[in-house]
Every structure is written in structure tokens, then in C-alpha cells.
Amino acid sequence: VVNTETGHDLAAQRADLAAVCRTLYGFGWMPGTSGNVSLRSGGSVVITASGRSKGTMAAGDTVVVDPEKGRPLAGETERPSAETFIHLAVYRQVPECGAVIHAHAPYSTALATLVGAEGVVGTALFSRLELAKGLGVADPSEVAVPVFPNWPDVPRIGEDVAGYLARTADAPPVLLIDRHGVTSWGRSLEEARNRMECVEELSRLALLTGAFGPDVAKESAR
Amino acid sequence: VVNTETGHDLAAQRADLAAVCRTLYGFGWMPGTSGNVSLRSGGSVVITASGRSKGTMAAGDTVVVDPEKGRPLAGETERPSAETFIHLAVYRQVPECGAVIHAHAPYSTALATLVGAEGVVGTALFSRLELAKGLGVADPSEVAVPVFPNWPDVPRIGEDVAGYLARTADAPPVLLIDRHGVTSWGRSLEEARNRMECVEELSRLALLTGAFGPDVAKESAR
Amino acid sequence: VVNTETGHDLAAQRADLAAVCRTLYGFGWMPGTSGNVSLRSGGSVVITASGRSKGTMAAGDTVVVDPEKGRPLAGETERPSAETFIHLAVYRQVPECGAVIHAHAPYSTALATLVGAEGVVGTALFSRLELAKGLGVADPSEVAVPVFPNWPDVPRIGEDVAGYLARTADAPPVLLIDRHGVTSWGRSLEEARNRMECVEELSRLALLTGAFGPDVAKESAR
Amino acid sequence: VVNTETGHDLAAQRADLAAVCRTLYGFGWMPGTSGNVSLRSGGSVVITASGRSKGTMAAGDTVVVDPEKGRPLAGETERPSAETFIHLAVYRQVPECGAVIHAHAPYSTALATLVGAEGVVGTALFSRLELAKGLGVADPSEVAVPVFPNWPDVPRIGEDVAGYLARTADAPPVLLIDRHGVTSWGRSLEEARNRMECVEELSRLALLTGAFGPDVAKESAR
């Protein structure tokens, strides 16, 4: 079904969401029913439905929501992910963003948990790591990835993200959530997935070498 | 073959058990011939046969047993897993339980081994970890997962499990066994598998961040 | 081709060797051209040829050798693995052995390297680990796995192995080689592979929990 | 299309490059759009195009370049990888080299980062590790793998590599780049891939056992 107004083929977008979920599940980054993925579709957002294993996702396990409140559009039968608010915050603040991925990738989540500070937005530093070029930032030689507190109230995380993105001109297209997970985005689903792969590998490298966080980064600024 | 009394399709259940075994073997969580999986089938329990590699399980590698003694029903040709008693303890104490998975997932087993105490039921704490929501407990912000001693006499482990479940109103649907492995359950095989994925990832996160066990949890209670 | 004397189907055995190689390569346990696998075939031994990636092994990448000197039988065109002598030492000392696997599985190799002693046969202890039951030893509660020095001269490793097996009544069906790898065996190829899976997982558990070697084992004998 | 002058089948070479990319992506060694692979094709070099996910590479995602400047030949439509200069340095200095692989394999990259020294070529030592035989060096008992500084200006890395190879008679066919990744080469693509597998596994072993670098190697020279 092509949206005649926007030219988007919604059926293909739903299938794309399901396919990337199956891939990321295969990487082990969406255990249980965790993780969620979305695409911008004209003025709306298509996002994965709540409570599904990502290993067997199909196009029907998605739902189109309005970009302000995250409510399913008329005719949609699925319930959107509880973390829709984080996705919407990114779409609102990043006009060129076309797709958002939220995952529980192990090394990113561990890094978030080690670096996360209580109640404030912390920072994980990727310092002079070549792979940071894959994030598409202006200066990949020193990338400050924000680490958000994991408020039980998900919309509050969305507000933190929106506030951070509004005040941070050169924000990287990835963010961490303390004791929770990692979110990436890009112009396309493939770009968002590429960046997810980069941030997870950068996090693994940080953990393997013990080089992460502001203090360590300063010390290692050789 | 549909059980005319219960409506269960036993052949489909046997095939489902075999399929989830192959999946979990693929994850590396059932090395050698370890691991076993069961389903409630009417008043009986279908469980994987003893001593098979889970990588090549077929529907025929299962056996229907009585839920009290774990003895094969008449007509069954396979020998049930030695750990059937642990499964039966769960089915007896958790009426809504429809499926049980026992695996040797590496991080859960390592966590059990690090946290396990001699001869008594210990505790691994998952403290404010988002993924704990995947366990379906009333309060996911602080989940106390029991760690059972690994008695050489398997029925004694079953008794410990039964006693714990009888006295613990809000027991999570996962348990660890010291120097041994991890067990999860749910209303369906898929729910049990989702929860296994969650407990293994939570255990990995605990190991990567060094945050597990009562003392550590208290210290990190920021 | 069935050996009319022994009833062995040599073509099937060659194909079985190739298949298990591809599986173990898929696990990451045979990097580069490392690893080798053999089967007893009547009075001879079929073993993988030297210098092949195990990811693309075919039945033709095997060679039948005599069990004493490891020389290819007449008509064989491939060169046997340099580590054939280790396989032959096991076949000579363990009459019921039907298959031998040698791999560079990461955790077993790391354990061997951490525990290995200079020039003498060391020991890695698996103490009260449930999965040790998968090794099929008389007393799985305390399994002493030998760690052999990695002599550059491979036949000398074979002599060490033969001597150890000759003097050790209850030797487990797995052995480690310092800075080198791990060898397992069983009555069948499947049993040897199951035991390889067990020793690798036991080694991972030992590394994750820091519990390995004589001293640690004594301390942890609670 | 067979090059009538050299006998190379360029179409097959392009397909081979794409296939090895997909394999190495499957190993997790080419996250995001990182990694690049090349083959010598007569007097030219075929290399992967810039900015593609290696998980979905096709033959068309390659480009033939001149071996001096790395410029696409006439008729080529793709842009070569930014790291082409590192490949060309190897081809120039190693006449028998037929293929080069550059990857962000996690353990090699972590080892490079731990061992790398500021602004000079460092060394990672693989000391008496059996798998080092897979690198095809004259003396595998002690392999000194160079660790190059990761200059933001890629041609400068290429110059360092060229200088090192020119002055090092027995250079191993693998090199590390600090905070960046690992490069391997061989007479064929398969040999380069086998050696990549070896150096990554050797690096994992070094990290798991804590044995790497000049000082540690000296201490552990038992």
C-alpha cells in the first residue's frame, strides 16, 4: 500500500521493521521481548508492537502511531511499544531522522551501567577510536555519548532525551540509558542499524580495554 | 494426535519441545547432552528424553510422564531426563505454569556459582535493571532470584525448589542452581524461552558490571 | 564403500568427519586451518588432511592412515594432520575410543595456558561442576583434566599422552595442551563432540568464576 | 570477464571479495560499514567500495584501482575504501601478496589498543602459542606483530606500513593499528582470511590469559 500523499510504501516499511528486528535478535541484542524499532512514514511513525519476541517478527507485528502522542492511528490493531516516547523524542528533535532502533545490546548496556550517574545525564567517551567514524559525527576523534537515567516513567526519559537533543548542537546519533540499553538513529533503517553495530562494538572495545568515562579519557589523552 | 479430553495436540507439543531445544542449543546454552525442556499436556507432562544432543532433537526424543513421580506413561519408549523432578516441582507449585526450560547458559551458571552459598538457598539480585521487566514479576525494580545448592541427589533439588515456591508468594519465574545452571518457566514455551533469554542477559550484565549479590546490591543502592 | 571385513562404510565416515569439522568451525573452535578430527575405521584411522580450512571441509579432505605410524594407506592422496600422533596415542591406549577431536576452542585453550606448568603434565580441576557429568567419568564431582606441555616436536606430545593414559586408570576423555588447545574422544564422533562442548563450557565457567587449578580448587572445597 | 593478459576472471574476483565480506560480517568483525578487502588482479587491485554494510555486499560493490595511487580505473563507478592506501602499501612491499583483509575484529583491536604506543610502532608478542603456526612465519614460537599509530591521515598509516615492511625481513602477514583494527594478507583470499582468523584468536587468547606485550612476554619466558 503506497501512501499517495508521501509516496511511502507502508507494507514494505512494516516488512523492513520486522526484518531488522529478526537480524538484531539474531545478534542477541533483543532478548526476551525487549527492543523496538521504528520508521518515519510520512507524517506518522511505524513502530514495533509491544511484547513480541523479535526473533519471529512479521510485518503485522507493527503499528502506525501519531508522532505527538504515540497513539495508534485509526484501523491499527496492535499496541505500540512502551518505549515509543523515546522514539518520538528523537523524531521531533532530529528532522532528518528516518529510523530509530532501541536495543539491549550487552556491551552498550554494560557501559551505560558502569558510566551512568544518579539522576543526571552522564557521558561515555569514545576517545580516538577509529570506529567512531561510523557514527557520522562532525568530530569522531572524541565522541561524548549521553547516558540517561532510567526513569521508571518512560515519557520522562523521552523528555530528558528531547531536552538533551534540543540543547546539544552536535549530538551523536546514539544514546545510552543507564541499566537499560542503547538507542541509535539515522536517515534510513540501514543507517540506524549500522550505527547500532558501531556503538555496540565501540562499547565492547571500551570494556575490553578499560578505557571509558571522563576520568579515564582524560588520563588516556596522550 | 489431539488429546480429546484436554484438546492438546501431543504431536505438536513434542515437535515444539524439539524446536526450542534446537534453538537453545544454537545459542550455546545446552552443551553436550545438557539441558531439558518440558510442557504441561493435560494432566501429564511431556519432557525431553535423557542423553541426547539438543542440536538434533526431533519430536521422537520426548517422553510423556506422570506429574507426580515422573514415570513414563504406558506406551512411551524413552527415558525422561534425570532433572524431571525439578520440572515437576515447578508444575506442582505454579498452577499457571505451562512450560519449563532448564539450561546451562554460561552467564547464569557463572552468576549462580559466584553467588551460591554452601547448602542453603542463596540470592542473586537484579537491581533496577530494565530487562527484569521481561520476567513478568510484580516489582521488577528489585528481583531476588534464588540460587539453590546443587545436591547430587536431583530429587532433593526438586524438594528445595518446591519448598521455596510454596513459601515465596512473589517468586520470579526463574531460578539458579549453584555450579549447575538455570531454570525458567512460563504459561507457554515461548514465554519460558523469553524469560530464559532475559535471565541470561541480566546475568551477563551483572557479570560485566560486577553488580550482583546482596552486598553489592546494597552498596549500589544509590 | 563398505569395508567388507569390518562393516565400516568409509565414505560415510569421511563425510561424517567433514560435517563435524564444519560444525566446530561454525562454533569458532577451529580458526585458520587449525583443528583435526579422526575416526577409527576397522584397523585403520581416518583423519582430516593437513592445512585445510574446516569451514569448507568435504569428504575428500580426509586420509586413511595406519594406526602405528600414521602413514597414509596405499591409494590415499592427502597428507594427514601433523597432530595425527596425538590421535594415535589415544586410540592405542583407549580401546573403546572410536573418534578423537582436537580443537583450539578459546576457553579451554586459555585455561590450559593459565594452568599449564613448564615441562610437566599439569592439572585443571573441575570441582563439583554439574556439566562434568557430560564427560562420562566415574566420579564427575572432581575431574582432574591433564594439561600437557606443548612440545614443538608433536610425537613427543603423543608420547606424553600415551604415558599418562597408560598410568591413569580413570583418565577423563578430554585433555588440554598448554598454549595450544584441547582434545576430546568418545565411542562415536557424536560422543567426542558432546564432550568437547562440555569441556569448553566447563572451561568458560572456570574462567568466568576464577575457579580452576589445584590451589583454587582446594580453597573452594567448601 | 577474463583478463586476456593475466588470465584473471575479474567477475569471479569481485564475487569472491563480496563473499568473504559477508562471512567476516557474520563473524562480527566488520561492524557498521567498517572493514575492507582487496585482491590483486593482474597489475591492478580490486577493492571493496566505501561506505557499505559488509553484510549485504555484492560483486558490484567493488572497484578496480591502480596500484600506485589507488584511483579507480576508467569505467569503474564506485569509490574505493578510504583505507585503500594501507592495502596498496602491502601489495607494493610484499610481491607474493595476492589478497588483503582489513577488519575491526574485537580482540585484535582491543589488543592493539592496549599495546599501542604513542606515535611509534609498537609490538604485540605472541609467545609460544601454537596457533601462531597458522600465520606461516619462519619462527612461529615468538611472533612480533607490529602495532601502528592510527594517524587521522590514512596515507600516513600506509607510509608507516610500507616503511616497516621494507625494513623487516621476517614481517608476519598481519598487523595491528592502535584504537583501530587489524590487517592480514596472503597469497589468496582464503589464506588472508585464515590468517585473520588466527590473529583474532591469538589476540583473544592473549587477552584471556593476560599475556601480551614485551614486558609480559619476557616475564612469561619460562
Image (spheres, coloured by chain):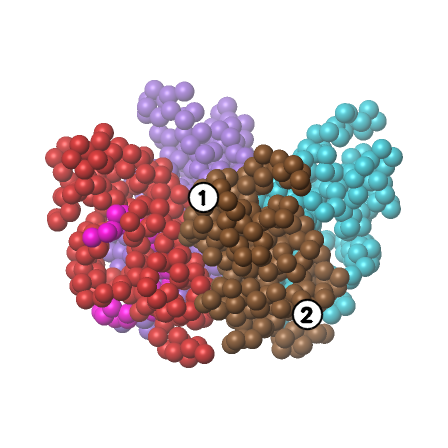
Chain colours: A cyan, B brown, C red, D purple
Precedes in sequence: disc 2 or disc 1: 1
Residue highlighted by disc 2 = B167
- Please check the rendered image and state whether residue B35 is part of the magenta-colored stretch, yes or no: no
Residue D207 horizontal/vertical position (percent): 43, 63
Q: Amino acid at mark 1?
A: Thr
- Against B119, residue B46 (above or below) is above
Q: Residues within 10 Å of mark 2 (few under 14, many from 20)?
A: few
Q: Position of residue B102 (x, y in %)?
A: 54, 55
| Residue located at (37% from left, 21% from top) | D2
Residue matched to label 1:
B77
Q: Amino acid at mark 2?
A: Arg
Marks 2 and 1 sit apart, C-alpha to C-alpha, by 37 Å
Whether residue D154 is visible here, answered yes or no, is no
* Badge 1: chain ID: B
* Nearest to the observer: residue C148 or residue B115: B115
Q: Quadrant of the N terminus of chain C?
A: top left
How far across and how far down the image is residue B90, in percent?
A: 62, 59
Q: Is residue C109 left or right of residue A57?
A: left
Asked if badge 2 and badge 1 are on a common chain, one would say: yes
Q: Residue furthest front?
A: B74
Q: Which residues are magenta?
A: C95-122
Taking the magenta stretch, the answer to whether it contains residue C121 is yes
Q: Is residue C65 left or right of residue B116?
A: left
Image quarter (top left, top right, bottom left or bottom right) of the C terminus of chain C: bottom left
Q: Residue C198, relative to residue A19: is it above or below?
A: below
Answer whether labels 2 and 1 touch (C-beta < 8 Å).
Answer: no
